[in-house]
Amino acid sequence: MNTTKDDVTLRLRRIEGQIRGLQRMIGEGQDCVEVIHQLSAARKALDKVGFIILTHKMQDCIKEKEGSEDSEAAMKEAMELFLSLA
């Protein structure tokens, strides 16, 4: 999980830079098409972070609850989280 945490943190810092770039673009009056392209890229990057976190949560839940009565509930929770990102 430490590697995942480092990866997610690095990705979020990049996204933070993208958002600052978007603020600058808007402040400078850049073309709206370019702004929209950058917004789309930032959104996709955030989605990727969400899916990375969700994937690891699903793996942890499945390993932790495998063979128990809670395994079905854990899978249901993971699927609900997945659908909230999709």
Image: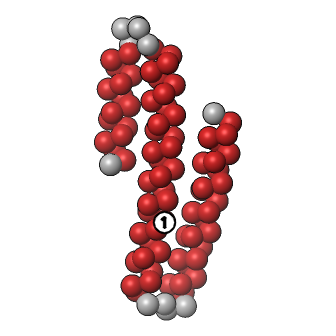
Residue 14's place in the image compared with 35, above or below, is: above
Q: Is residue 9 left or right of residue 37?
A: right
Q: Nearer the viewer, residue 27 or 73?
A: 73
Query: Which residue is at a point 34% across and 19% down the rendered structure image?
Result: 73
Q: Tell me the residue that label 1 is attached to.
A: 42
Q: How many marks?
A: 1
Q: Secondary structure at mark 1?
A: helix
- Residue 36 in which image quadrant: bottom left
- Residue at the image position 55 percent from the left and 70 percent from the top: 19
Does residue 79 sit above or below 68 in this rendering?
below
Residue 29 in the image: x percent, y percent? 49, 92
Residue drawn at x 32%, y 26% is: 76
Q: Residue at x 32, y 49 (%)?
A: 86
Between 20 and 66, the one lying in front of the other is: 66
Determine whether 40 is above or below 27 in the image. above
At label 1, the amino acid type is: Ala
The spot of residue 44 in percent (x, y) is: 44, 60
Spot occupied by residue 25 in the image (x, y as percentages of width and height): 53, 84
From the viewer's perspective, tell me whether residue 58 is left or right of residue 21. Answer: left
Which quadrant: the N terminus? top right
Q: Quadrant of residue 10?
A: bottom right
